[in-house]
Every structure is written in structure tokens, then in C-alpha cells.
Amino acid sequence: MALRPRGPLWRHGDFLKLWGAQTVSDFGARITREGLPLAAVLSVRATPAQLGVLAALTLGPSLIVGLTAGGFVDRTRRRAVLIGTDLLRAAVLIVVPIGALMHWLAMPALYLVAFVVGAASVLFDIADHAYLPSLVGRGDLTDANAKLSVTESVAEMGGPALAGVLVQVLTAPIAMAVNAATYLVSALFLAGIRHREAAPPPTEQKTSLRADLAIGLVVALRQPLVRPLFLAGLVAGLFGAFFQTLYVVFAIRTLGFSPALLGVIIAMGGVGALGGALVFQPLSRGLGYGPAVVVSAVVSAASALLIPLAGQGRLVAIAMMVASQLLGDSFGVAMLIGTKSLQQSVLPNALLGRVGAAMRAAGGAAAIVGAVAGGLLAGPFGVRPTLIVGAAGLLAAQGFILFSPLIRLRVLPAPAA
């Protein structure tokens, strides 16, 4: 199990610092994730269309950073990128509490914060994904990703509930000041890593953003085990953005939940995510590596249908929302552990930044369309029917994974040349 205090990673001081940095920032990130839409709904009284724009600006950086950052990450020491993005997020988040105290907080300020923090977070994730294989050995990749997912799951349990309470007691803008401090602590942990990262290989030919993106896309689409993950992520990004746009307004306005209750319900997803982080390795040993990824993807997507179907009384609605969080997050995290480790194993380390950025760009483009479409469709058709369409699309996207070579993959493949 990921948290059992045995194995080489428990004696790996630099990995423990990386783990600590991600643990601290994960908690703060949950406050920002819930706090921005809650601030828009409760403080600025945003409309569904405005929430769609806010979600699009949160997701849009995946496209912009994905188009520009892949080659930069592959040609730069990745730990420096991680520290820089932590400091940037801390600086930008201070704008929200200052704006609230000065009484000029409005949707344009929330749009700006959402975009900059989203961009920095995408760059952090791309660099982190590429940095981990250089810090730990291939044999420890699945265990390392599982450990990182465990604490992310704990943050998913505690972070949203804490965010809901803080928003209700202190207001959303003041609550998000806590996140700025967590990014500073994360940067300090990362600065303490002693491992000397190898210098990026010299580039002999002239590079361009277009060439970097093309390389990332070609490598992702030509690798038969990565291609279905790329295509499924593209379609899932489109329909999953419906939930990014409408989940909060559905829970608060349609179901009548309070911010604190919503925070507790979202925290139940953390309980499920913790189970997923602990269960993927035994699940892959029992079913085989690929089938474990496939089953996790299908069950996670199917659970999204429970959200728009929630109703028939307050207790039933709460139970269905909690069930969706438990199932969706548990199998979603299990799938994420499997797919991350798979990509880090089969793709060349020197190209991980460009492939990750290309996948982010494609998913980000789909998510922008989905976020805006979700907000616009909810106006004439209603929030609940729009979420039903989103859930159906998420489930259909898993067909790329279900009918792929992953279903026959028994063990984690050997590294790429």
C-alpha cells in the first residue's frame, strides 16, 4: 500500500520533500477551486453565462500553456519551473483578499485571477510530470504516483470542507488568502531538494512553438498505448467542462445546498480518491495493468450520471451526490495513477514536457468549448438537462480506452528508447 512505511521511497529525502510540497499546495488549491466560483455566486451574484466564462478562463490556460510550454519545460531545469510557478500563484492570489478589503472585487478581477493561477498550475503540472522520473527510478514510478495521489485525496477530503466553512465564516475572498501562503510553503520544500537535476540536452537545430507542439502531438498519437488516452481525454475534456461550469450553481440553486454542505459533499470525493490511490496497485495485480486502467475509466465516467439525476427529496439528492463523488473520484484517481505511470514509462524522458503540453493544449481547447457551451445551453434548456448531456459524453469518451490495446496490457511496459 502507498502509505505503508516501507520501501525505498520512505528513505528518499528528496522525494519526501517533493511529496511535502505537493501536499501543502494541494490543500490550498482546493480552497481556490471552490472559492472562486463561490465568490462569483455569493459575492458577485454571477449568472450561469458568467460562470461559464470563469470556468473557461480556469481551463483555457491548458490550451495556451500547452501551445507554448512543452519545449520550454524540456529545455529548462524542471525544479526551477516548479518553484517559479508556486511563487507566481502566491502573488496573484493576494489580489482577491485585497480586492475584497478595498471593495473593488468584481468579475473582471476573478477572471484575471482564474486565468493566471490556471496558467501557472498547468505549467506546474507539466513540469512536475516530467520531473518525477528523473527523481525516482522507473521501478518506483507507480508507487511514487500512488503516494502523491494519496495526499491529494486527503486534501480533496479536507480542503473543500475547509473551504466551505471558511467561505461561510470569513467570505470566499478572505479564505483564498490561505492558499497564497500554502504556495509559499510549497516553494520552500522544493527549494530544499538536494538532487542535482541533469542539464537539459543541447538543442542543435532551431526550435519553434509550432515544432514543439507538433512533436508532442505526433509522439502521443503514434504511441499505441498513449493514443487512446489522448483521444479519450480530448472528448472527456469537452463534456467534463459542463460540470466545471455548472456543478456549483446546480448544487446551490437547484438542489438548495449551503456552501458548507456542498464543501462536505465534495470532500466525500476525497474519501473515494484516497481509496483509489490505495487500490490501483492491488487492482492492477489482480486484473492486469491495462484492464485496471480501463475499468477505472469506465466506472469513474459512469458515476457522473448520478449528479444530474440527484433529486426526489433532499436526503436522496445528498446521497446521490455523495455516491457520485465517492465512485467518480476513487476510480478517477486509480485511472490517473495508471495513466501517469504508463506515460512516464513508455515515453522518452526528454519529450515528456512536449507530450504533456500537447495533451494539455488539446484538452484545454476542448474544455474551453465545453465550458462556454455548458453555460450557454443551461440558459434555454436548464442546468439539469445540460449536465445529463455532459455525463453521457463523458461515458462515451471511454470507448477509445475500452477498445484499445490497453485492455490486453498485463504489466507496465519497459521504458522507451
Image (spheres, rainbow, N blue to C red):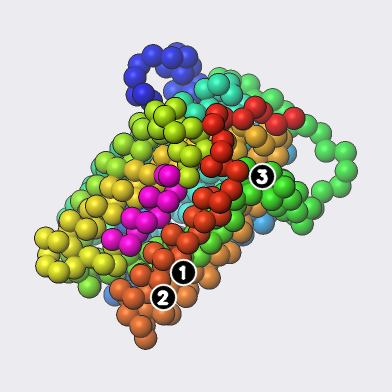
307 vs 50, left or right, is left
Q: Amino acid at mark 2?
A: Gly
**What residue is at 46 percent from the left and 18 percent from the top?**
9
Residue 224 tag number: 3
User: Which element type, helix, strand or loop, lies under badge 2?
Assistant: helix
Relative to 78, residue 57 above or below: below
Q: Amino acid at mark 1?
A: Ala
Residue 375 tag number: 2
Name the dominant secondary structure of the magenta segment.
Answer: helix
| Marks 1,2: beta carbons within 8 A | yes
Residue 14 tag number: none
**What residue is at 44 percent from the left and 27 percent from the top?**
285
Q: How many marks?
A: 3
Q: Nearer the viewer, mark 3 or mark 2?
A: 3
| Marks 1,3: beta carbons within 8 A | no
Magenta range: 295-306
In percent of width and height, residue 320 lies at 22, 58
**Quarter of the figure with the N terminus:** top left
User: Which element type, helix, strand or loop, lies under badge 3?
Assistant: loop
Mark 1 and mark 3: Cα distance apart in space: 29 Å
The residue wearing badge 1 is 371
> Relative to the observer, which residue lies in front, 235 or 121?
235
Q: Can you tell which quarter of the image residue 185 is in? A: top left
Q: Is residue 316 magenta?
A: no
Q: Nearer the viewer, mark 1 or mark 3?
A: 3
Mark 1 and mark 2: Cα distance apart in space: 6 Å
Q: Residue furthest right?
A: 205
In percent of width and height, residue 211 lies at 79, 53
Q: Can you tell which quarter of the image residue 223 is in? A: top right
* 1 or 3: tag closer to the N-terminus: 3
